[in-house]
Amino acid sequence: MNPLAESLNATISAEAPHMFEMLSELGKRFYFPSKGILSQSAEAKKKATRFNATIGTALEDGVAMHLDCLMEQLPGISADNALLYASSPGNQKLREAWQAKDLKDNPDLAGKPCSLPVVTGGLSHALSLIADLIVDPGDLFLYPDKNWGNYRLNFVERKGAEPKLFQFFKGNGFNIEAFRQALDECAAAGRKKVIVLLNFPNNPTGYSPTDAENSAIAQALKDTADKGVNLAVIVDDAYYGLFFKPEVTRQSLFTKLAGLHPRILAFKADAATKEVYVWGLRVGFVSFSIGGVKADSPVFEAVNAKMGGIIRSVVSNCSALSQFLVLNALKSPDFFKQRAAKAEVMRQRALKVEEALQNPEYAQAWEVYPFNSGYFMCLKIKKINASDLRIHLLDKYGIGTIAINDTDLRIAFSCIEAEDVNELFRLIFQGWKDLA
Ligand SMILES: Cc1ncc(COP(=O)(O)O)c(C=O)c1O
């Protein structure tokens, strides 16, 4: 093993032995190659006052070499800010600004042991980075039956984890009994490590828990950790902030898990993607917390160095221009106001959906899964197959929806103007009547 990896491993196992146990073989092997080109370049940046011939970029007249036909598209942005490389763990100022944003959004995180976020190429990349760090083939991966399809691709198909689903809903809320039972089954089966993934606001249903539900989830995890099971819990906050009902907790589940238990390694995977409305810019983040360590523990830097190394090996670093744009947006005094204004537009759409679904006729065609947040809502279609309905809606009415399985049809109301919502559901109902 590389001595740099050995040194990081020594720090991690001394500070947080259960976290070390949860690293994958790849995670254990990885390190940031700080003694090679990168450190020599950094040294030269400080000391090479005459000529700096270290970096694999091209300079001209002291700035990044560029084509005018490209830079003309970016008025007001310097070629250096737009074109030069970012570092593998990301633009330091952006990492700090995102951490400050997360703290403002989640005040209960204050004082809890938590890493500085690492920048990823969107949230999908954040999830794959976490998966590389902690998943070995055969590890148990527990997640809800209402989930985003990419989880399977990432954790099961790509990393070889063994999937285990629990039922997401019971009545109008989160199925805490099913979650607890699934964890109990893992413990009873002698599992020493379980990877858990929870996503709120949930894709595909648009459900977010109450504070009491979040506390119950955290308690179930803590009880399992008390039995000696190591838990790596990934909280996917992709749709964070789009909360439409007063009963929904405004803070991420991550706040309840941060620092909770030495056997609970909590990851917060979030992104500018949906929060800042920049889907194609590809800016995401990974932060993590582990119980039993101080807020300034060296474990945070050590694990971030491993993540930096994994990023370096796969994409080297993420778009500097995208990071620059998101950083400037975060620095704007109007950021929170503008974000809230867009969330209000989304809330109005969600309320329109709720109103449209009051139509008593619709009860013969579907049940509505609880929704109170995010981009989506789901219908549980009666009598006919959801895929058949999807195809019929497309072919006859020009309406696109997503069939999640045989019964569930996902509607992204996020991209439907409020005044079109009634018509959308009227036509979906018409389509259902055609087939039923
Ligand atoms: C629950 C959830 N997580 C993660 C993502 C991925 O986001 P990104 O586009 O930043 O990769 C999505 C995107 O649809 C999502 O729905």
Image: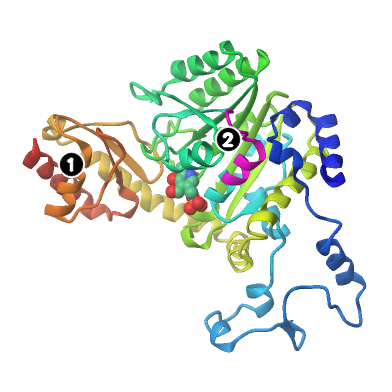
Query: What is the span of residues highlighted in magenta in the rendered image?
Result: 128-139
Query: What residue appears at the point 72 percent right and 42 percent down from the top-left corner?
Result: 115
Q: Amino acid at mark 2?
A: Ile
The circle drawn on residue 388 is: 1
Q: Nearer the viewer, residue 170 or 25?
A: 25
Residue 59 in view, yes or no: yes
Answer whether residue 247 is magenta in the image: no
Q: Residues within 10 Å of mark 2 (few under 14, many from 20)?
A: many
The colouring scheme, among rainbow, by chain, secondary structure or one colour, is rainbow
Answer whether residue 137 is magenta in the image: yes
Query: What residue appears at the point 38 percent right and 38 percent down from the top-left corner?
Result: 206
* Residue picked out by circle 2: 234
Say which quarter of the image contains residue 428.
Answer: top left
The circle drawn on residue 71 is: none
Residue 111 horizontal side relative to residue 436, left or right? right
Question: Marks 1/2: CA distance?
Answer: 34 Å
Say which quarter of the image contains residue 77.
Answer: bottom right
Q: Quadrant of the N terminus?
A: top right
> Which of labels 1 and 2 is toward the front?
1
Q: Secondary structure at mark 1?
A: helix
